Image (cartoon, rainbow, N blue to C red):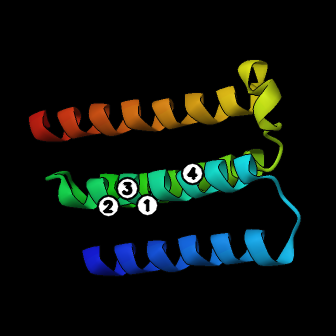
Amino acid sequence: MKSLILSIGGILLAANIAILMLLTSCTDMVLIVSSSVILATILLIFVSTILNIKDAFKIFLSLFFIFNGIVEYILSFFVAAEETLKNDGFLIAIILLFLFQLICLILINSFSRHG
């Protein structure tokens, strides 16, 4: 299962790079942010499968990370160019969603050990 997650993540990352570089005229910042979102989502799913948590939590976390990854991926297309990156609300939303997922992973890991 772990190797399947990594291979699907690699395929999605390669497809993202190929589509954004070859077929569309997106900025480099969109490519970087969308690729980072895919990597972060795959990493969170992979870490949740490695941790010793209960199966119901693993299923919930996988679905939760996939849903948030799709939302973050869509938000990554609205990230502005590099000059106005300082006050970009979409980038802030992506970072906050990632931090929320990380906090959920930590809390569920601690609750699953004590429960």
Q: Residue at x 87, y 70 (%)?
A: 24
Please provide percent x and percent y for residue 34: 65, 54
Q: Which residue is mark 4?
A: 37
Q: Label 3 amino acid?
A: Leu
Quick one: SS at disc 4? helix
In this rendering, would 103 be left or right of 17? left
Q: Label 2 amino acid?
A: Phe
Q: Are marks 1 and 3 in contact (CB under 8 Å)?
A: yes
Q: Which residue is mark 1?
A: 42
Q: Residue at x 36, y 73 (%)?
A: 6
In this rendering, would 30 be left or right of 96? right
Q: For mark 3, does the 10 Å Cα neighbourhood hold few (<14), some (14 to 19), or many (20 or more) residues? A: some
Q: Label 4 amino acid?
A: Val
Sequence order check, earlier mark of 3 and 4: 4
Regarding residue 17, the answer to whether it shows in the image is: yes
Q: Which residue is mark 2?
A: 46
Cα–Cα span, label 3 and label 4:
10 Å
Q: Residue at x 81, y 25 (%)?
A: 84
Q: Which residue is mark 3?
A: 43
Regarding residue 1, the answer to whether it shows in the image is: no
Nearest to the observer: residue 98 or residue 114: 98
Quick one: SS at disc 3? helix
In this rendering, would 107 be left or right of 95? left
Cα–Cα span, label 1 and label 4:
9 Å
Please provide percent x and percent y for residue 109: 22, 39
Indicate the quadrant containing the N terminus: top left, top right, bottom left or bottom right: bottom left
Q: Are marks 4 and 2 in contact (CB under 8 Å)?
A: no
Q: Are marks 2 and 1 in contact (CB under 8 Å)?
A: yes
User: Farthest residue toward the top?
Assistant: 87
Cα–Cα span, label 3 and label 2:
5 Å
Up-down: is 21 above or below 113? Answer: below
